[in-house]
Amino acid sequence: MIVLFTDFGHRDPYVGQVKARLAEHAPTQLVVDLLHDVPDFNPHAGAHLLAAFASGFPPGSVFLAVVDPGVGTPRDAVVVLAGGRWFVGPDNGLLSVLTARHTDTRLWRITWQPDGVPATFHGRDVFAQIAAEIASGEFPTDKLAALDKLAVEFDAGDLARVIYLDHFGNAWTGVRGVPNDARVSAAGVPFTHSESFGFAGKGEGFWFNNSVGLLELAVNRGSAAATYGLKVGDPVKVQRLN
């Protein structure tokens, strides 16, 4: 299984071009579109989202992860094995949180690049072929070199900021496992806890631990982003009472 995680969006041709390359080099592999709306140019937010999502996929899955504002510069490209799953992407911090949260991590730098490749689309021209070979069981030893550590490493602890806004306007944060009696606020507004949407009144704001274990701010039948003016990067205060 190859899992796509990018900031490419759905309006442009980039996802289709990547899938075409994967079909060429790994025609029997299932390709799953996990997320193509990772906050634009934001590997920090992406790193916490990817770490939260990864355990929901079976061991052996290959994640092609592309949030790469430095594409074409001297930044390295890497392969990571962590938690029994593979990750292919830029060495810009995007893969660093999940790397730090596992003890079985192995790292490689991608040393290969095809001749005449454009500088702006390594997701298709480099990462996709490497991911396809790994997913097909043909580990590309000739295209990789062992690596001791990533060049860019974000703090692997919780990130008390909004890291993603879904189309409902729910605000995901990078904070994990918050107890129900915690005090949570954002945009100067306190949020009460609710187990789920149906337990809050219509139009009422609340917080909950979402399906991948992250604290999320929401409004029942409304948009937390619109109601409270929340945006990616906004701080979230979490006070644990115990």
Image: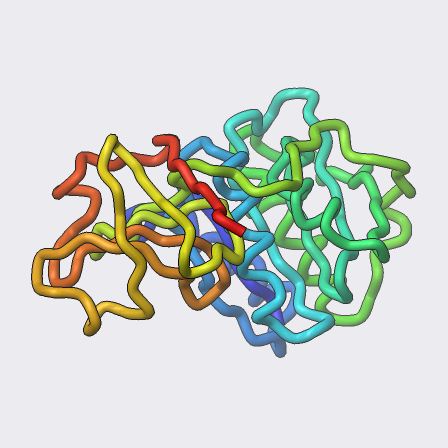
Q: Is residue 54 above or below residue 30?
A: above
Q: Is residue 207 visible?
A: yes
Residue at the (84%, 61%) spot, across then down: 139
User: Which residue is outermost to the front?
Assistant: 242
Place of residue 175 in the rendered image (x, y in percent of width and height, measured from the top left)? 50, 47
Furthest toward the left, the residue is 202
In the image, 235 versus 133, the foreground residue is 235
Is 195 situated above or below 216? below
Q: Quadrant of residue 208?
A: bottom left
Please determine whether, in this image, residue 177 is positioned above or below residue 187. Answer: below
Quadrant in the rendering for residue 137: bottom right
Q: Is residue 183 left or right of residue 228?
A: right
Residue sitting nearer the eye, 117 or 54: 54
| Residue in the picture at 54% in, 60% down | 53
On screen, residue 15 above or below 70: below
Q: Residue at x 90, y 37 (%)?
A: 148
Q: Give the image location of residue 58, x and y in percent.
A: 65, 75
Q: Quadrant of the N terminus?
A: bottom right
Residue at 60% across, 25% down:
72
**123 left or right of 170 in image:** right
Q: How many marks?
A: 0
